[in-house]
Each structure stands twice: as C-alpha cells, then as structure tokens.
Amino acid sequence: MRSENLDSPFTPQQPSADAAKVHGAIKFNDWITCPTPTPAAPLRLFCLPFAGGGASIFRAWGRALSPAIEVCPIQLPGRENRFREPAHTDVLPLAEILASQIQLYADKPFVLFGHSMGALLAFELTKILQRQNAPLPLMLFLSAHRAAHLPPRRTPMHALPDEEFIEKLRRFGGFPDEILEHQELLDFLLPTLRADLTLCDSYRYVPDASLNCPLQLYAGRQDTEVSPEEIEAWNEHTTQAANLHVFPGGHFFLRSDADALMQAIAKASAQIGPL
C-alpha cells in the first residue's frame, strides 16, 4: 500500500523561513552533517547511529549510493566533534530535538535510516513529526532493533561495573578489541556508551497512532541481540507496507554486509520514484 504523498514523491515541500535561511547559505549544522553535499539530489537520507556510534559511520554512504540521494548523517552529542557535550539519556527529549532539526532540512523529500539505538530514535522522531503534521519520511528504514512494543530480551547493562560492561560490549561485536583493550580510549568512550545504553534500557513504549509511511526492516541472521521476527513486528506500527530484509551477519551487519545493505537501500529508494 502506498501513501498518497508518494504519487509525486519529489515535489519539494515549502521550506520554513528558518530552513530557507539555512539553505540560502547552503549550510549544515552540528546535528545534520553532509560529508558529500549533492544539492541537486532530489532525495535526502538522514542516518542515525547505534549506541556509541557517530556520524562518521555513514561517511562513505554518499559515495556508495546514487548521486540522486544526498546522505546526511546525524551527529549526536557526546561523540566525535561533539565529544565535549554530554550525551542524552532519554529517548523522547532527544527525539524532539531531532524532529525540529530535520524540519530545517525538509525543503525536499527525505527518508530516514536508524540502526539499533538509531532505529528507536528514528521511530520516535517520526511519531513526533506525524503528530505535528510536519513532512514525514517517504520511507523509514529500521535496522537491528526489536519493534518498540516488544519487551527487551536482555537485562539492563548501563549500570554494570566497567569489567562486565566492557565484556557485554565485546559480545555485541561492534567494537574492535584494540579499542576495548585500550584504557585511555575506554575512559574517553565509556561515558557516552553508558549514556546511550541508559537511553535504550530506560525506553518505555507509549501506544500512538500508526505511522503513515512505509517501513524497510533490516535484520542480521546471526544477531544474538534481536531476531528477524522481532524486527518484522515493526509492521504493527504502520498503515502502509513493511518489508523485511535479512542479512547474513550479526548485530553490526551494517559493517559486515555493507555492500549488500547499500544495494538494499538503493533498491528500496528506487521504489519511491525515479532516482
């Protein structure tokens, strides 16, 4: 089932005065980055990272995807160039900020991708956009996170002692041993990692209207954190189509299966309209 606003998918939304100022200067900001600006692209892809991740995870996506897609990684506080800012520990206030930031760049159609923690944030900020009658993503990509209404499978880990916390991170497989065994790096990263895991562990789903945008759901067959069935359950949160794609890898298949993921995103985006 397709949304009515997909009939003319690349008809630009009218920007607000603030958005016009931003784009008049062709300027991104601390929240919305763009490593490979493509002003003529008819579609923007906003990307949200997993816990502990930064915008650099998506740096190569602008070159890997079609030039018709302008890739805009979102940089959250507490990491990379924003390492001096405290990371957020609550989903909803952060989602409110993200929703307002994305609206600055809603002068053209957009899609939204989130992996693990990023999927949770993408879902909640889209709910906010819908409640505000703001432009919605033409497609929402939810990757490696169970559907919001499902209970967590693991016990909270944000308050574990450092040794146990690091061992849990090792099992996830997303952080190289050279980082987890480097004490200075860990001292630098742990506050943000604990904040991100606090955000995830403390999340409580509040029922709301189903989203009026289609979903692309991505899972890793070897993911011990979340099963494909738990990800497929996101289909309960949309009035439109929800398609599941399962990759061979584990929780961090966005790295291990990067080429296949790029192909899947490109194929799904092409279904929106001609790129």
Image: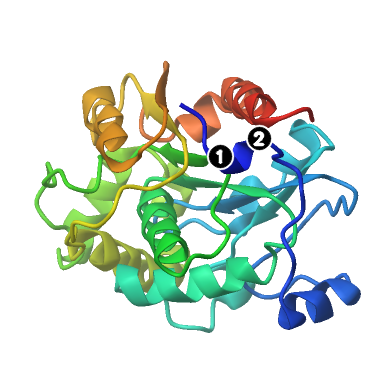
Q: Amino acid at mark 1?
A: Glu
Which colour assignment does the render follow? rainbow
Check the image and report above or below for 110 versus 259. below
Q: Residue at x 63, y 23 (%)?
A: 259
- Residue at image mark 1: 4
Check the image and report above or below for 77 versus 172. below
Q: Is residue 78 visible?
A: no
Front-lying residue, 32 or 169: 32
Q: Position of residue 208 (x, y in %)?
A: 24, 57
Q: Secondary structure at mark 1?
A: helix
- Per the rendering, the mark at residue 274 is none
**Quadrant placement of the N terminus:** top left
Q: Residue at x 44, y 57 (%)?
A: 126
Q: Position of residue 145 (x, y in %)?
A: 31, 41
Answer left or right for 166 relative to 219. Answer: left
Answer left or right for 134 relative to 24. Answer: left
**Quadrant placement of the C terminus:** top right
Q: Position of residue 33 (x, y in %)?
A: 70, 63
For marks 1 and 2, give the CA distance.
Answer: 6 Å
Q: Amino acid at mark 2?
A: Asp
Front-lying residue, 71 or 126: 126
Q: Residue at x 45, y 72 (%)?
A: 188
Q: Do tag 1 and tag 2 residues touch (Cβ < 8 Å)? A: yes
Answer left or right for 68 relative to 83. Answer: right
Check the image and report above or below for 109 versus 265. below
- Residue at image mark 2: 7
Q: Residues within 10 Å of mark 1 (few under 14, many from 20)?
A: few
Q: Residue furthest top?
A: 248
Q: Secondary structure at mark 2?
A: loop
Check the image and report above or below for 188 versus 224. below
Q: Residue at x 36, y 38 (%)?
A: 239
Q: Is residue 148 visible?
A: yes
